């Protein structure tokens, strides 16, 4: 899914007050965590995922894997928090044109 800059800004504004829905633990990115993120995306469309990793390279690889596995759109990364969007069949969030 390709989003325009206007749509990305709109979604970032909606994501600002949200709290992280999923937080990776000591085991890192497991199948269960990916399934939970996928489920949260299907339900909410716009979520935050917290990736507490001290290694910047590892954190980037984990975030890229999450985006790839969930077919989501990476809107923004702030510190250890990834903002993800994936439109569901019900289209809960109406994107601007």
Image (tube, helix red, strand yellow):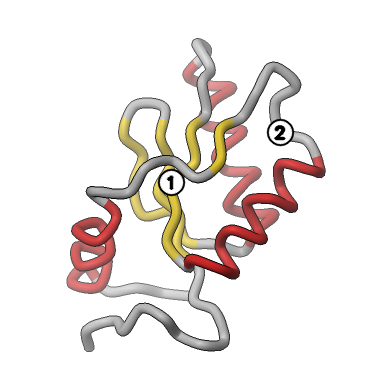
Tag of residue 48: 1
Task: Left or right? Give the position of 52 relative to 65.
Answer: left
Q: How far apart in space, not on screen, are marks 1 and 2 (Cα)?
A: 15 Å
Dot 1 falls on a residue whose secondary structure is strand
Figure check: 10 above or below 57: below
Task: Left or right? Give the position of 57 relative to 46.
Answer: right
The spot of residue 8 in percent (x, y) is 27, 65
Quarter holding residue 79: top left
Mark 2, residue position: 29
Task: Left or right? Give the position of 28 relative to 60.
Answer: right
Label 1 neighbourhood size at 10 Å, few (<14), some (14-19), many (20+)?
many
Q: How many marks?
A: 2
The spot of residue 1 in percent (x, y) is 48, 75
Q: Residue at x 69, y 17 (%)?
A: 26
Mark 1 vs mark 2: which is more N-terminal?
2
Looking at this view, name the residue that lies furthest to the top: 54
Q: Residue at x 32, y 49 (%)?
A: 18
Q: Residue at x 56, y 68 (%)?
A: 43
Quarter holding residue 12: bottom left
Which one is in front in this view, the residue at disc 1 or the one at disc 2?
1
The quadrant the C terminus occupies is bottom left
The spot of residue 47 in percent (x, y) is 45, 54
1 or 34: nearer the viewer: 34
Figure check: 19 above or below 57: below
Figure check: 52 above or below 68: above
Q: Residue at x 74, y 52 (%)?
A: 35
């Amino acid at each position: 899914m390709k989003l325009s800059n206007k749509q990305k800004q709109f979604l970032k504004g909606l994501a600002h007050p949200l709290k992280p829905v999923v937080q990776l633990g000591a085991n890192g990115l497991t199948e269960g965590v990916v399934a939970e993120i996928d489920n949260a995306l299907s339900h909410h469309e716009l979520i935050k995922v917290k990736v507490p990793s001290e290694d910047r390279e590892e954190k980037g690889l984990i975030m890229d894997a999450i985006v790839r596995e969930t077919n989501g759109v990476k809107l923004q990364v702030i510190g250890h928090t990834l903002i993800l969007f994936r439109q569901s069949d019900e289209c809960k969030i109406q994107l601007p044109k």
